[in-house]
Image (cartoon, rainbow, N blue to C red):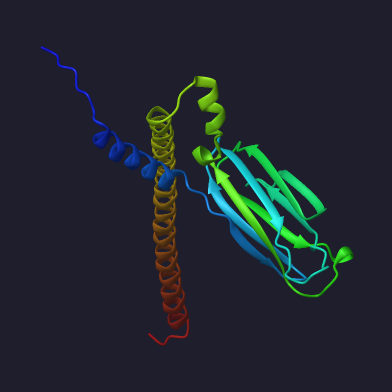
Amino acid sequence: MAKDINLSSGTRNPLLLFLCVTTLMLLRTEAIWLTIPSKGTKCMSEEIQAHVVVLADYYVVADDVKGHQPQTVSAKVTSPYGNNLHHNENVTHGQFAFTTTESGNYVACFWVDTKHQESGGETTISLEWKTGIAAKDWDSVARKEKIEGVELELRKLEGAVEAIRDNLIYLKNREEEMREVSETTNARVAWFSILSLGLCICVSGLQLWYLKRFFRKKKLI
């Protein structure tokens, strides 16, 4: 006989707390600060698999000096094959969003606009880079599907688990590709070693034959 199980508030609260903490650990994103030299480029990259949503916001961190205008920067984001995904010049803040089409390193580069540079010092920018499940708008999902509370946290956990599974599959495929490349390289090196050894033996035999013939002509043997 089936029995109804009622969770008391004392049982539900720790469960909700555990779900919230776990989800926050899986979905947390932290902004990083990049220090850009007065002359030069600062880049960051991340290896991302195909069909992943990427969102990013960046802005120039203002100096503490009163009346000092924030320095403007330029930004450029490229795909693993060199395709231009974002390009912005002479700005103090910006954002970009795209869905990856190929797997590999996606590079974001920033540099100071020398034409509008007020000082020769370094410039600091704050960059918040979100990928995959962390870039999903969960507020819109909750409003659209009319879910909240534990159900929403479970949905986040489900998305995080799927993202982890996809990442593990991607890493497994990469490992198989690297193993195939390694085995092919080892086979080529082995064949090259055999050919080199055979060539050395042939050259040594020819040298012995030539020397023996030379000494016989000179009647030394």
Quarter of the figure that contains the C terminus: bottom left
Give the vertical position of 151 relative to 206 (above or below).
Answer: above
Expressed as whole percent of the image width and height from the top left, the position of residue 42 reads 68, 63
Give me the residue at 54% from left, 24% from top. Answer: 143
Give me the residue at 45% from left, 79% from top. Answer: 211
Expressed as whole percent of the image width and height from the top left, the position of residue 66 reads 79, 70
* Figure disc tally: 0
Expressed as whole percent of the image width and height from the top left, the position of residue 220 reads 41, 87
Give the vertical position of 90 relative to 84 (above or below).
Answer: below
Expressed as whole percent of the image width and height from the top left, the position of residue 22 reads 37, 43
Give me the residue at 52% from left, 32% from top. Answer: 138
Give the vertical position of 127 relative to 26 (above or below).
Answer: below
In terms of depth relative to the viewer, which is nearer, 170 or 46? 46
Residue occupying the far right of the picture: 115
164 horizontally vs 68: left or right: left
Which image quadrant for residue 204? bottom left
Give me the residue at 70% from left, 45% from top. Answer: 95
